[in-house]
Image: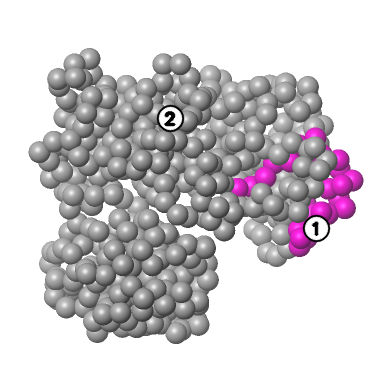
């Protein structure tokens, strides 16, 4: 890496006329282009062809835009001879432009590295708390941010949660803490840093590891390796899942700062330096002097139930977030107060309504088998709506594991063959129907109608697709909205007064 790039570790460094290519024009790519243009760099944005609401703004911010197929290296990029390329998270490592960059020895940064380098824009940089995992990232980030805010800190949940870290860095009000959700894609590109100023988070957490994004990373091993980057150079506390041995192994292999502590969590009784549950009470045995003999009460499962946070996988998120917040000095009382006020996002085990003692639950955000497994495990008798883009992941084990709790299954998605085949092999006794609608508007009304013919009193009809949504919907949120709308249109006038079959830990 050039001496000039090595020197770019501050907003106030000399970025003027640095030649930068930004690959992608999503929210992350645009934030990178906007930041670099503001810094005075010579910015070329490369984006796929097609409509993009941000395309018209590129010239306004002082950058240039090339929209092309991107299956080859654009001539404009070669002509630019960039000093560095900033890559948006969605671009595969074997993309032709990135392979070209490697042959030309052009450094590639992700948005997280760029954000870390310019984090001092509005004064003293915020501390960073990093969160990754196959599932539960967004909920844990939101919980942690709520706890920090309850302590009076200026906190920004950002990153893969939807607000680019670069936007948080440039916010003129400034923050004390960023709670940064990191995808495996962002961590992959973060691992390629070669500059002198690496990300050194205050605390970090890897919540769990399961099969996901194999199509992007090329192998499960590469995916796991990327996730492990979250712990590197952590200064205060590394939070790991005691019930997931892979997270502990990643922590053992990480290069943390001297003095950083390993803090475990799970739904069992905690040991010293852990968070866990004792007789229905969430406790901290990590951040107190007498941790070998004592524990601090955080909250109770009953209180979490009252806030809609009692499903086991959500309790795990609560434990991880509590550990992160406590590592920053938030008191148990402040954590408890934040939890009492917290409510889950839409599309995460969201009870739509209950009618005829049948509950309809929207967990559209369960976009992989690991997330769907947690959702299914929360209910004893389920009519399961599943299917979509499987991203190279096999659902056979998931189906076999939960076959005894399934009243029936409704399979959606344009390519249903893999799911149907898995049911035939591993759960042939489960009643199975499929939605053959091609029109997005028809999918969920059909799915709801078919599920209603299978479900009986006491069942939960659960949308937990174990798959991505882009085969038939814009994203998981649209999929969840359409499911909820179809349920309400059919049943709202007949909804019971109170829900049944609430998940519990």
- How far separated are the C-alphas under marks 1 and 2? 41 Å
Residue under circle 2? 252
> Which element is circle 1 on?
loop
> Which element is circle 2 on?
helix
Q: Give how far across and how far down residue 351 sits, in percent.
A: 25, 62
Q: Is residue 131 above or below residue 370?
A: above
Is 65 one of the magenta-colored residues? yes
The mark found on residue 72 in the picture is 1
Q: Nearer the viewer, residue 95 or 69?
A: 95
Q: Nearer the viewer, residue 190 or 142?
A: 190
Q: Residue furthest front?
A: 425
Q: Nearer the viewer, mark 1 or mark 2?
A: 2
Q: Nearer the viewer, residue 260 or 60?
A: 260
Q: Quadrant of the N terminus?
A: top right
Task: Determine the image quadrant of residue 332.
Answer: top left
Q: Residue furthest right?
A: 79
The mark found on residue 275 in the picture is none
Task: Determine the image quadrant of residue 63.
Answer: top right
Q: Give how far across and how far down residue 164 sits, in percent.
A: 55, 42
Q: Which residues are magenta?
A: 62-89
Q: Give how far across and how far down residue 196 sits, in percent.
A: 66, 22
Q: Residue furthest left?
A: 279
Give the mark nearest the N terminus, 1 or 2.
1
Give the residue displayed 71% in from the left and 59% down from the top.
48
Give the residue displayed 25% in from the left and 32% down from the top.
275
Residue 172 visible: yes
Is 110 one of the magenta-colored residues? no
Give the residue displayed 79% in from the left and 26% down from the top.
2
Residue 159 visible: no
Q: Answer with left or right where residue 132 lies relative to residue 375.
A: right
């Amino acid at each position: 890496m050039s001496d000039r790039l090595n020197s770019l570790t501050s907003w106030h460094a000399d970025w003027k006329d640095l030649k930068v290519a930004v690959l992608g024009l999503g929210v992350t790519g645009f934030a990178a282009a906007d930041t670099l243009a503001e810094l005075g760099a010579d910015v070329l944005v490369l984006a796929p062809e097609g409509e993009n609401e941000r395309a018209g703004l590129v010239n306004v911010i002082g950058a240039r835009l090339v929209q092309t197929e991107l299956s080859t290296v654009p001539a404009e990029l070669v002509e630019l001879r960039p000093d560095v390329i900033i890559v948006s998270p969605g671009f595969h490592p074997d993309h032709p432009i990135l392979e070209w960059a490697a042959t030309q020895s052009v450094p590639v940064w992700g948005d997280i590295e760029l954000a870390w380098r310019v984090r001092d824009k509005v004064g003293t940089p915020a501390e960073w708390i990093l969160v990754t995992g196959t599932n539960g990232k967004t909920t844990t980030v939101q919980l942690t941010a709520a706890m920090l805010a309850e302590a009076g800190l200026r906190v920004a949940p950002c990153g893969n949660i939807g607000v680019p870290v670069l936007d948080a860095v440039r916010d003129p009000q400034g923050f004390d803490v960023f709670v940064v959700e990191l995808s495996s894609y962002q961590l992959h590109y973060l691992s390629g840093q070669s500059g002198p100023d690496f990300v050194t988070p205050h605390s970090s957490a890897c919540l769990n590891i399961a099969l996901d994004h194999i199509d992007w990373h090329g192998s499960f091993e590469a995916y796991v390796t990327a996730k492990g980057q979250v712990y590197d150079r952590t200064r205060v506390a590394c939070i790991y899942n005691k019930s997931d041995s892979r997270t502990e192994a990643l922590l053992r292999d990480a290069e943390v700062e001297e003095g950083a502590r390993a803090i475990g969590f799970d739904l069992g009784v905690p040991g010293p330096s852990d968070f866990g549950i004792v007789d229905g009470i969430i406790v901290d045995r990590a951040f107190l002097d007498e941790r070998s003999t004592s524990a601090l009460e955080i909250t109770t499962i009953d209180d979490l139930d009252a806030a809609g946070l009692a499903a086991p996988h959500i309790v795990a998120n609560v434990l991880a977030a509590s550990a992160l917040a406590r590592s920053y000095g938030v008191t148990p009382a402040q954590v408890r107060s934040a939890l009492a006020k917290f409510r889950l996002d839409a599309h995460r085990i969201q009870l739509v309504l209950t009618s005829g003692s049948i509950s309809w639950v929207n967990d559209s955000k369960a976009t992989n088998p690991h997330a769907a497994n947690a959702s299914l495990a929360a209910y004893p008798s389920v009519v399961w709506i599943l299917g979509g883009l499987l991203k190279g992941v096999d659902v056979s084990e998931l189906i076999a594991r939960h076959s005894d709790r399934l009243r029936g299954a409704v399979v959606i998605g344009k390519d249903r063959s893999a799911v149907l085949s898995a049911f035939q092999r591993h759960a042939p006794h489960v009643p199975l129907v499929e939605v053959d609608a091609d029109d997005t508007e028809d999918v969920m009304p059909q799915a709801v109608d078919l599920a209603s013919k299978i479900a009986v009193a006491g069942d939960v009809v659960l949308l937990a697709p174990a798959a991505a949504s882009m085969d038939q919907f814009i994203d998981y949120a649209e999929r969840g909205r359409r499911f909820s709308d179809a349920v309400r249109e059919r049943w709202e006038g007949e909804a019971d007064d109170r829900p049944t079959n609430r998940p519990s830990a």
